[in-house]
Amino acid sequence: MSIIDPTFEIDEKGRVICQRHTKYPFFIMPGKNRQQEIQMEKDLTCITCHHYINDECFFPKIEIDKIEADRLSMVAFKCKLCGSQIDRMLTVIQKLYSQEKFKIEIPLICCTCYESLKNKNFMEYYGKRLYLAYFLNASIIIGFILSILMMRSPTSLISGIIYASSIISLKGILKKTFHINLSVREIRKGKKYFDKFYKNSV
């Protein structure tokens, strides 16, 4: 059995595509409708490739399963520019393959940040995310302060706690569902990485 070495390309939306994936012809098919685009998003993973199913990829099946488990746990793979979780498996696979095969370190960058770099508006995107992060953090603090100030009124106290808890939940939903990290520390860390490696090229 021959082992399949993956090769990669990045499409116009910043998505990493494996050229050896058995669904590659579908991935690059022009004129896909909305339903086909949704299906493509689901299929952009090693799990849907016959090379994975037949255990003939460069990465053994058991290793791919572990990579996928780490990705879904939302702790292992983060975008270098915004700190958001990388939600596309092939982005992670490309990095790991380059690192293992060629000893080349490729930074993990999410599609949104990649697009902002390509469109030369990363700083605008950074500013909006930082503003939203500060706004949500301030809202949480205000909610708790109001709760403390209104402790004499049980109803007001409960309302303040519910308000602050709702904002915290919103941040959690944005991070878990939409992979948007609104940690001020992570956003500023990404800005430093941008200044060091990308500022002069965009």
Image: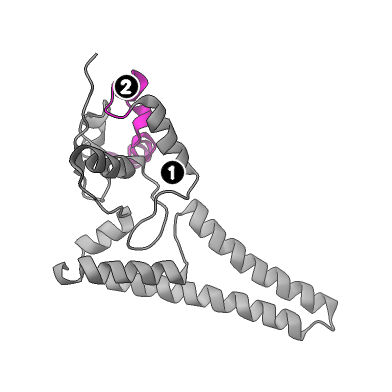
Q: Which residue is drawn at 24% across and 13% down?
A: 1
> What predominant SS class does the magenta segment belong to?
helix
| Circle 1 SS class | helix
Identify whether 139 is placed above or below 76. Answer: below
Label 1 crowd (10 A; few <14 / some 14-19 / many >=20):
some
Which residue matches tag 1? 71
**Segment tinted magenta in the rendering:** 32-59
Left or right for 8, reference 113: left
Which residue lies most toward the bottom here? 149
- Of 142 and 35, the residue lying toward us: 142
Q: Does residue 121 appear in this view?
A: no
Which of the two residues, 3 or 54, is positioned nearer the viewer here? 3
Q: Give the residue at x 39% y 69%.
A: 187
Residue 76 in picture, x, y percent from top left = 43, 48
Q: In this view, does 150 lie to the left or right of 71?
A: right
Which is more toward the observer, 17 or 38?
Answer: 17
Q: Are marks 1 and 2 in contact (CB under 8 Å)?
A: no
Does residue 146 appear anywhere in the picture? Answer: yes
Secondary structure found at label 2: helix
The extreme top residue here reads 1
Instruction: Give the Cα separation between the discs numbered 1 and 2.
Output: 21 Å
Q: Which amino acid does label 2 sit on?
A: His
Residue 160, relative to residue 80: is it above or below? below
What is the basis of the colouring in this image?
one colour
Q: Nearer the viewer, residue 11 or 83?
A: 83
> Residue 120: where, in percent of width, then height?
20, 67
Question: How many discs appear?
Answer: 2
Disc on res. 50 = 2
Figure quadrant of residue 18: top left
Question: 10 Å neighbourhood of mark 2: few (<14), some, or many (≥20)?
Answer: some
Residue drawn at x 47%, y 50% is 75
